[in-house]
Image (cartoon, rainbow, N blue to C red):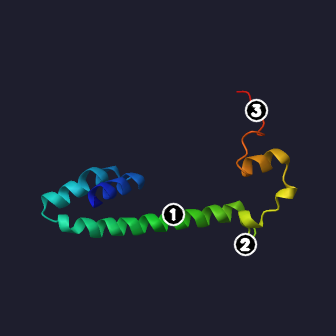
Amino acid sequence: MSADRLTALCVEFRLPTLATELVQRLVAGGHENLLPLVTEIFELEAGDRRERRVDRLLRLSKLPPGKTRNTLDEARLPRPLVAQSSGDTQNRPVVDT
C-alpha cells in the first residue's frame, strides 16, 4: 500500500521520473523495507505544502486576522450570494451559456 501512496505523492508533486522509478528501484535493490519511511517523509512534505498553500492564499486574500465563515455577517451580502453560500440551489440565478 505504501508503494501506491508513494507513487501517487510523486505524481502530485509533479515528479514523473520518481513516480515511475523510485518504488521499482527500491524493490529491485532489496530495500522495500524503506518504502514506509520514504512514504512517511513524502507525507510530511505533502502536509507542509498544504500548510504553505493555505498560508499563501490567506495572505493573498487580504482578509483581516480572525475572519472566518463563522464571523461573516451574511446580512451584508447580496441575496444571490447568500443563497450560494448556504447551498440553496433552488433560488440560484440561472445563467445562460
Q: x, y percentage for residue 70? A: 73, 66
Residue placed most toward the observer, 94 or 33: 94
Sequence order check, earlier mark of 2 and 3: 2
Indicate which label's residue lies in the foreground, 3 or 1. 3
Q: What amino acid type should be assigned to the residue bearing mark 2?
A: Gly
Residue placed most toward the observer, 8 or 85: 85
Indicate which label's residue lies in the foreground, 2 or 1. 2
Identity of the residue drawn at 41% across and 53% down: 12
Determine which residue is flagged by label 2.
66
What label sits on residue 50 in the rendered view? Answer: 1
Q: What amino acid type should be assigned to the residue bearing mark 1?
A: Arg
Disc 2 to disc 3, C-alpha distance: 34 Å
Residue 6 falls in image quadrant: bottom left
Identity of the residue drawn at 70% across and 27% down: 97
Sequence order check, earlier mark of 2 and 1: 1
Secondary structure, mark 1, is: helix
Sequence order check, earlier mark of 3 and 1: 1
Residue 40 falls in image quadrant: bottom left
Label pair 2/1, CB-CB below 8 angstroms: no
Residue placed most toward the observer, 82 or 49: 82
